[in-house]
């Protein structure tokens, strides 16, 4: 311990490591039980999947803008790797379908949730509650490895005969079951791994928060980020198992020929199916959305958590309405379990059910609005530092606002009938997740990077990254609302061209300008991709060449993670932590510094 | 810094980390099995006909008794540890393991009985021919069930094989199937002589496997998942009974906690069976 204390005084990052540095590379970086290493493993893996998901989307966007024309640059590679489905570098409808399904799956289950819960949650929760590690370090390691295996199974499925799953990330039966390729089976096995991983992770985070809080760190003194992770982990713990059950049943349908989700008298391609029948397609949808709606809040709640940390640090004032935020997050957690069927208005499940779920859906928007309002009011009167993380978090507010408000017409069954399954839906949830959650993730990366590496990321290129991303995100997603309102279906591999032909035959079709927007969107998407290059270079370059931090608390924040050495060694803290105050005590009157760390005791009178 | 509360409970919660962890795990398990039980209800409510009493009640009752006994034994083992009687713990934990293994053995016998037991539905023409050829067909023909409006025959294949079905029959080019039919009138009456059914007469042939009907699909899914939990329990408890029990010498408190967690889990496995049993064997 003495060595570590000395290391902290010097701010020397290397010697803190050396105190525990008698491990080989494998045990230190691959089979590590240290929550920080596990967090970084999650982070790196998930960022790679984020890039993969993005590249899949770029290829699909090309197909939407220029249906049937060869993909420049990547087309030849695709043909070499995947074979016939990309003959002559052109994307077939099958390939489009499997990219579509895998883009959704990868982004939700392999990129964003592992980033925001696996990486941020793992790295920060023990630090922010003053704990030496997670409650179950070995389980933590296992959670990452199971996640990795799930991801690899998903990834490998691209290369099997027939390609990856093709039935959308929602995998609705009977389509998913009767598609004759093996992709769906891989998808299901991969999902079982991912669900197991998130189960282990969420148990770990819950036990850590409940049991390992430092003395004095009462529930209402927890940083809001920890609260957000707490509610999120409950959602993961309780909402994922029904999808696991559904996955097992669909796997039974695929492998043993049972009929859980296949109804009696099912006819596929003009042929009656040779099955026992008696199953229910609606059952799959209920079980799937029972997970997948809470999953939306799994995506957004930790983003709120990051926002709380970044905003308070950069406004130099306390959050407005801390307890409102906490109760808001808790209510979202509870209500999110009873809104799932608002994804199913068009299934014919009945108007009484629709009315119920439409009511709960409107109710859940109240705590969401409360939370965003609290953040907005928190800005009032602050002396705002426009750092890169702050820019991302400031942009989050209006972007999430657009995403949230455009969700209301989807929550009402009458307007959803028109908008369902159109590009409007795509625009809506991407506004929530892409310039919403992913902006929060970027903000979080820029914000905590100095703690993890001991160096800042480059500020100028950070700003370039932010402003370009902000502009192009909007250019990508905003036109989708228009396309959707004019009726463009979300799953057409030709970008709606078939609809345009329908207009000529006297049917109400899609106007040509709505189809042409596809080209603009694709251009914006390519530009958005280019805008990420500064980030990628900055991320790696700054590890060695960024401006070094001068103290362990470079942003002058109050929460406990900044009280560790930089980067934190094994065991995190050099002295036992005790919390004496709330999480965001900035600009207290009568103090020299404008921030008062949580572990600072009241001065003796 | 060491991780706190690995052995001693935290004052506010009264729990050590492991115990909270296992309870949270079980909360998630409740949701997993809850979803499957809900699916059972939905499938059954939506079904035109739901088979009942398809399983051997004596074997089911025996298995229930074995599992309940093991639940009692496992607690006696933990109590023995609390009383610092390590040898008694070894005995009771060993008996628990024995019960678990016997449970699986009986379950696999039950499974096997289903895999080589068949139901066959004839085509309309085939049914007419069958009735004409066998004047005493009344005692074999079952009322319509899985396929609405279709009578069926049940029984074993003459060569006793498992997992055969009409797809394999057609793929192999088999000309006929020799079935030893079950009598339904009187139930369990004299064992009938084998009858021959031409491949052309058969519309559908299936063993009592998941593809047979929703009933067997959910039966195998639920009991299979339960059996996986039993196997998981056996692995953990066997480790704690064998090599893992060395911890008793170094950290008796922590070892007792581990046993307590495995006891909580084992009770849960038992509890799930107490729901599975009436759903399939009684209702």
Image (spheres, rainbow, N blue to C red):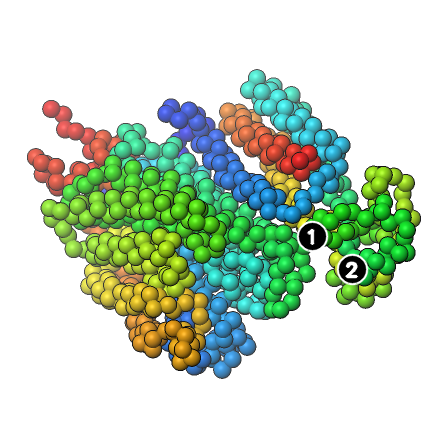
Picture quadrant of residue A487: bottom left
Mark 2 and mark 1: Cα distance apart in space: 13 Å
Q: Residue A581 at what x, y percent from top left?
A: 21, 32
Residue at 60% over, 52% down: A279
Residue at 84% over, 41% down: B185
Q: Which residue is mark 2?
A: B124
Residue at 63% over, 52% down: A278
Rate crowding at label 1 as few (under 14), some (14 to 19) or many (20 or more) other CA atoms within 10 Å.
Answer: few
Q: Residue A28 at what x, y percent from top left?
A: 43, 49
The mark tally for this picture is 2
Chain of the residue that carries numbered disc 1 in the rendered image: B
Asked if residue B213 is positioned above or below residue A210 in the image, the reply reads below
Picture quadrant of residue A401: bottom left
The quadrant in which the N terminus of chain A is found is top left
Q: Which residue is mark 1?
A: B148
**Residue A109 visible in the current orientation:** no
Chain of the residue that carries numbered disc 2 in the rendered image: B
**Residue B151 visible in the current orientation:** yes
Residue lying furthest top: B83
């Amino acid at each position: 311990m003495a060595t570590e204390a000395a290391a902290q005084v010097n701010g020397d990052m290397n010697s803190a490591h050396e105190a525990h540095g008698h491990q080989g590379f494998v045990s230190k970086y691959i089979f590590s039980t240290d929550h920080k290493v596990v967090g970084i493993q999650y982070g790196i893996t998930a960022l790679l999947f984020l890039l993969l998901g993005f590249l899949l989307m770029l290829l699909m966007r090309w197909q939407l803008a220029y249906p049937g024309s060869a993909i420049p640059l990547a087309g030849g590679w695709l043909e070499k790797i995947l074979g016939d489905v990309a003959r002559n570098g052109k994307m077939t409808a099958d390939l489009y379908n499997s990219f579509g399904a895998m883009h959704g799956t990868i982004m939700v289950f392999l990129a964003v949730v592992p980033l925001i819960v696996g990486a941020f949650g793992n790295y920060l929760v023990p630090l922010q509650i003053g704990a030496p590690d997670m409650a179950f370090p070995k389980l933590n390691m296992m959670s990452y490895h199971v996640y990795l295996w799930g991801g690899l199974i998903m990834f490998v499925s691209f290369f099997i005969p027939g390609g990856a799953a093709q039935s959308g990330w929602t995998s609705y039966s009977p389509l998913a079951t009767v598609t004759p390729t093996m992709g769906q089976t891989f998808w299901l096995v991969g999902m079982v791994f991912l669900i197991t991983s998130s189960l282990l992770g969420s148990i770990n985070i819950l036990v850590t928060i409940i049991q390992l809080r430092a003395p004095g760190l009462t529930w209402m003194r927890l940083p809001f980020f920890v609260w957000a992770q707490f509610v999120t982990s409950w959602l993961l713990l309780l909402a994922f198992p029904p999808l696991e059950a559904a996955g097992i049943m669909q796997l039974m349908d695929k492998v043993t020929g049972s009929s859980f989700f296949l109804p009696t008298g099912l006819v596929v391609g003009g042929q009656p199916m040779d099955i026992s029948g008696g199953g229910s397609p609606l059952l799959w949808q209920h079980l799937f959305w029972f997970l997948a709606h809470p999953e939306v809040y799994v995506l957004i709640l930790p983003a709120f958590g990051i926002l709380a940390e970044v905003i308070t640090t950069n406004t130099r004032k306390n959050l407005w309405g801390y307890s409102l935020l906490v109760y808001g997050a808790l209510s979202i957690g509870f209500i999110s379990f009873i809104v799932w069927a608002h994804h199913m208005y068009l299934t014919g499940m009945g108007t009484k059910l629709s009315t119920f779920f439409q009511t709960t859906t409107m109710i859940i928007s109240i705590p969401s609005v409360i939370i965003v309002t609290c953040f907005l009011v928190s800005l009032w009167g602050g002396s705002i530092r426009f750092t890169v993380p702050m820019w991302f978090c400031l942009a989050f507010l209006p972007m999430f606002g657009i995403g949230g408000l455009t969700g209301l017409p989807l929550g009402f069954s009458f307007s959803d009938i028109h908008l369902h399954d159109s590009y409007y839906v795509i625009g809506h949830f991407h506004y929530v997740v892409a310039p919403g959650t992913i902006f929060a993730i970027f903000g979080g990366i820029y914000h905590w990077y100095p703690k993890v590496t001991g160096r800042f990321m480059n500020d100028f290129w950070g700003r370039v990254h932010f402003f370009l991303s902000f502009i192009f995100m909007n250019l990508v997603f905003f036109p989708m609302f228009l396309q959707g309102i004019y009726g463009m279906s979300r799953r057409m591999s030709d970008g709606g061209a078939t609809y345009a032909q329908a207009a000529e035959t006297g049917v109400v079709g899609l106007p040509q300008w709505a189809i042409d927007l596809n080209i603009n969107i694709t251009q914006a998407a390519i530009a958005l991709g280019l805008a990420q290059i500064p980030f990628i270079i900055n991320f790696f370059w700054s590890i060695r060449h960024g401006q070094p931090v001068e103290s362990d608390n470079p942003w002058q924040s109050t929460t406990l993670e900044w009280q560790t050495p930089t980067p934190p060694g094994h065991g995190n803290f050099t002295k036992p932590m005790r919390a004496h105050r709330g999480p965001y005590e900035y600009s207290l009157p009568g103090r020299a510094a404008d921030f008062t760390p949580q572990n600072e005791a009241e001065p003796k009178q | 810094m060491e991780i706190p509360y690995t052995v001693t409970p935290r004052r506010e919660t009264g729990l050590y980390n492991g115990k909270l962890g296992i309870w949270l795990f079980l909360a998630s398990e409740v949701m997993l099995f809850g979803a499957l039980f809900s699916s059972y209800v939905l499938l059954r409510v939506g079904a035109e006909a739901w088979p009942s009493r398809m399983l051997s009640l004596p074997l089911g009752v025996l298995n229930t008794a074995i599992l309940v006994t093991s639940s009692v034994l496992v607690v006696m083992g933990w109590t023995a540890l609390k009383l610092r009687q390590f040898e008694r713990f070894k005995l009771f934990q060993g008996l628990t393991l024995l019960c678990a293994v016997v449970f699986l053995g009986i379950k696999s016998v039950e499974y096997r009985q289903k895999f080589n037991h068949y139901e066959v539905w004839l085509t309309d023409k085939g049914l007419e021919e069958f009735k004409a050829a066998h004047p005493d067909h009344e005692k074999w023909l079952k009322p319509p069930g899985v396929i609405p409006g279709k009578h069926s025959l049940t029984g074993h294949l003459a060569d006793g094989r498992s997992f055969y079905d009409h797809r394999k029959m057609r793929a192999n080019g088999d000309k006929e199937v020799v079935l030893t039919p079950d009598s339904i009138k009187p139930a369990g009456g004299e064992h009938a002589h084998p009858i021959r059914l031409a491949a052309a007469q058969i519309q559908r042939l299936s063993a009592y496997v998941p593809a047979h009907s929703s009933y067997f699909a959910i039966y195998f899914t639920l009991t299979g998942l339960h059996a996986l939990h039993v196997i998981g329990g056996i692995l953990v408890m066997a480790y704690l009974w064998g090599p893992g029990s060395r911890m008793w010498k170094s950290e008796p408190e922590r070892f007792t906690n581990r046993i307590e967690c495995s006891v909580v889990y084992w009770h849960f496995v038992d509890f799930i069976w107490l729901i599975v049993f009436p759903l399939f064997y009684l209702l």
